[in-house]
Image (cartoon, rainbow, N blue to C red):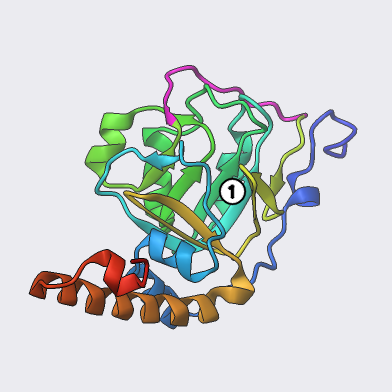
Amino acid sequence: MSAQSSGKVDPRLTTRLDVPRLPEALLARAAALPASTLHEAAGKIGVLPPAIQGISSSFRVCGPALTVHSPPGDNLWLHRALAIAQPGDVMVVYTSGVHEHGYWGEIMATAAQACGLAGLVIDACVRDVTLLQEMGFPVFARGACMRGTGKDFGATGFINHPVLMGDVSVSAGDLIVGDADGVVAIPHAQVATVLDAAAAREAKEAAIMAKLRAGGVTTLSLYGWD
């Protein structure tokens, strides 16, 4: 009996495995840059909803997106994504606009660490927050909610298809960087160019701060706003 005829959705029908990968050299460069700098250098694009924050202010994440579009109140497709995750991936999850469930917790984070997942970015809530903080697994979420999720084998989800996070479309393989300022997504094809612009921006800002520390100038004069 097929998955369809038994009432179960075959996850292979909506799961993509041929995801573009980012070179390790680019990922290493990105890991050293603040999320806000990458956003500015990219032309002020890619900011995920500001409600999505690290559950610890010390958390930082950087890696290519493993995208998941999950049915509401259900985390089965997150488990399925874990089963195909590659080391260094960042799972980026859209939960169909239903935020107030604990879609992720200690067991899933343990499985994620075992397979080398770099972190989770979810437009919803998680639970076991203290344990996740103690584990040091980077989670960026809307907050904490203890309400459980279901496992509907007849519901359709999508893995490695584009997901809409706020007004930002995130595709599998896009660069995801999150820190205390929030999370930014940089389209895969633009990453190398954005990293060059971000490095130049960091150097320029370092020079400006050196002049300010030396005294005798203002931000108005330095930026030509006076």
- Tell me which residue sits at (55%, 49%) in the image: 92
Quadrant where the N terminus is found in the figure: top right
Name above or below for residue 104 compared with residue 163.
above
152 in the magenta segment: yes
Disc 1 marks which amino acid?
Answer: Ala
Callout 1: helix, strand or loop? Answer: helix
Image spot of residue 68 (x, y percent): 63, 46
Left or right: 187 in relation to 33? right
Front residue of 199 and 3: 199
Q: Quadrant of residue 126?
A: top left
**Magenta residues?**
143-154
Q: Which residue is mark 1?
A: 81
Quadrant where the C terminus is found in the figure: bottom left
81 in the magenta segment: no
Left or right: 200 in relation to 125? left
Front residue of 199 and 131: 199
Image spot of residue 48 (x, y percent): 53, 48
Q: Residue furthest left?
A: 214
- Tell me which residue sits at (47%, 26%) in the image: 102
Answer yes or no: is residue 86 visible. no
Image spot of residue 101 (x, y percent): 52, 23
Tell me the chief SS of the magenta region. loop
Image spot of residue 22 (x, y percent): 53, 75
Q: Quadrant of residue 150?
A: top right
Name above or below for residue 15 compared with residue 34.
above
- Tell me which residue sits at (17%, 76%) in the image: 211
- Tell me which residue sits at (20%, 71%) in the image: 209
Front residue of 43 and 90: 43
